[in-house]
Amino acid sequence: MISVLAGGVGAARFLSGLQQVTEAEDIVAIVNTGDDTVMHGLSISPDIDTVTYTLAAAIDPERGWGLRNETWRSMEALDRFGAVRPAGSRAGERWFNLGDTDLATHFYRTSRLAEGASLTEVTDEIRRAFGVRVRIVPMSDDRVSTLVHLAADGRVVSFQEYFVGMRHSVAVSRVEFDGADAAAFTDLALLRDAECVVIAPSNPVVSIGPLRALAGVDEVLAARRHSVVAISPIVAGAALKGPADRMLTELGMEPSVVGVARLYAPVCGTLVIDEQDAALAPAVEACGVRCVTTDTIMSRPGVGETLARTVLGAALTGGD
Amino acid sequence: MISVLAGGVGAARFLSGLQQVTEAEDIVAIVNTGDDTVMHGLSISPDIDTVTYTLAAAIDPERGWGLRNETWRSMEALDRFGAVRPAGSRAGERWFNLGDTDLATHFYRTSRLAEGASLTEVTDEIRRAFGVRVRIVPMSDDRVSTLVHLAADGRVVSFQEYFVGMRHSVAVSRVEFDGADAAAFTDLALLRDAECVVIAPSNPVVSIGPLRALAGVDEVLAARRHSVVAISPIVAGAALKGPADRMLTELGMEPSVVGVARLYAPVCGTLVIDEQDAALAPAVEACGVRCVTTDTIMSRPGVGETLARTVLGAALTGGD
């Protein structure tokens, strides 16, 4: 069993490569749910859906989220309510776009949760409906909400509001994981008993951070860190996607593979960095982390598979 | 002010005619909410929507419900979940069809209710969003659920399950309005102070029945029955739409204008019946109800307006 701690797009692409080079049934993706939200009464799990849709090859390749061949009739029809929405209400707002066919996934999830099913059960049903063979597991069945404190005015907003609503173009002073103290990690045995654990190239703060905030996760990883391999989501000082680079800076960390190495050193023995950052390998190793250099930019075909092979090789040879 | 007790399609067509012959702002439609349901996590008010969409000329004229130029992508996308839905679950079922643009209305309603708005407030916002000038008021802000007891096995199902799921093709032994004892009618002054009250040509049992089950309604109507006018939804022994005729028979009533007259006699002074039933006028009057005969089949253009004029005339001349 290979366990992968996963956020959204970067993790999904890595998992997509990984299922090409090893048995899909042996892979478990443990996915961040700190981004989960309720819109229009619907329970939405953005990272789980991105992983599911990507592994099903059903994702829209341009957008990187949502389904291929999507239409937006429902969202467009919300426009008529703009004029009647009372001050202070957010009903019918359409900053969070949900495609017509994507909606069906949220309908199914919402109904199953209302019937008393756990998010774990529903997630498994949905990935099977999409023909995905990799196991997809939410990090917790308990609610954890990533909250973002804005530097400008100290206002606290939900992750989706920051990420989608504000297009993550505002400075952040703090990130908190509301509910993480009381939430249980899905199953620590998935981390303890796995042949290796991979930390996917996801935002270390808001994608991997929520998983690490759950009781036991860091301890279990630390105890087996020689076979924990992380992939840096930062390449040449910038995030391939999203605000990870700015966020690291804003929170007082270094927006580089060295910053990532420092964050992950307690829990992983090996950091895989991109060739563009080869010169920083000694600085990474100075953090107490073995450094492996390869091509990590998975937007090019075949790179995901090669990266997956490199990661698996690194895990087998140990890093500590 | 003219108050109209309303169900779905028949009431909507009558209201549509009525707003052509009198000031739309003077009309209040008080609409049945016993059919309201939750599907896919969304709060759905079928009769309110049918009235709203019809008065906005946005209704699909062939189906009689839902919006024109509709698409069904969301519902179609639910099909993939059929294979993974566990036994006993009803998640993602698509017997209750919701069009892509219609969904936006349910999104708005669901979000507003979650924000703490009353159904009355939300309904008013939605009708304004659709440019409707007639006031549309839910019969109650409290939950009332019409439940149907099936004759065959005594099973109790929701109204939508009976009406849509089973296409109302099963015999009924009893109809109950769960919650009606505790629910408050929207505002008895709407019945007390109106110039006249019209009981629209809706199913007397499952559309008008829930309104009459609320405390005070029958009493207020009885006290002013001379200016309460009902329109029979039964023409020549058959319902123009839906199961009203069979339902009356199954519940031991007569599926005719005379059966309707008996049901409404305590609360209305005049019953308007279709010309096809002219021969039954004496039998209607024998129930203690004045009988007015006219064309009531509103599927033909112009009939709704003429019918509305006849109804208003009858209300002014009194029936008792």
Image: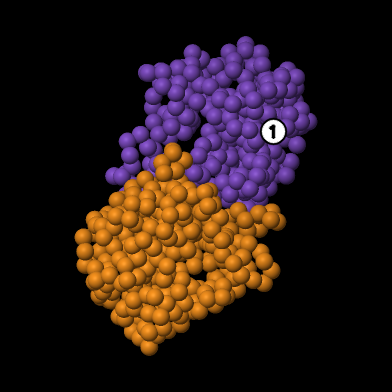
Chain colours: A orange, B purple
Q: Determine the residue positioned at 54% across, 58% down.
A: A177
Q: Is residue A59 visible?
A: no
Left or right of B23, for residue A4: left
Q: Would you call the spot at circle 1 few (<14 residues within 10 Å), some (14-19), or many (20 or more)?
A: some
Taking the view exactly as shown, the residue that stands out farthest to the top is B286
Q: Quadrant of the N terminus of chain A?
A: bottom left
Position in image of residue A123 (x %, y %): 37, 50
Residue B168 vs B98, above or below: the answer is above
Along the viewing direction, whichever of B190 and B236 lies nearer the viewer: B190
Q: Chain of mark 1?
A: B
Position in image of residue B104 (x %, y %): 53, 52
Residue A57 vs B216, above or below: the answer is below
Residue A262 vs A66, above or below: the answer is below
Q: Determine the residue positioned at 49% across, 13% down.
A: B252
Residue B223 vs A276, above or below: the answer is above
Position in image of residue A184 (x %, y %): 45, 49
Three-letter code, disc 1: Thr
- The quadrant in which residue B250 appears is top left
Helix, strand or loop at mark 1: loop
Q: Quadrant of the C terminus of chain A?
A: bottom left
Position in image of residue A199 (x %, y %): 37, 66
Left or right of A183, for residue B290: right
On the image, numbered disc 1 is attached to which residue? B186
Taking the view exactly as shown, the residue that stands out farthest to the bottom is A279
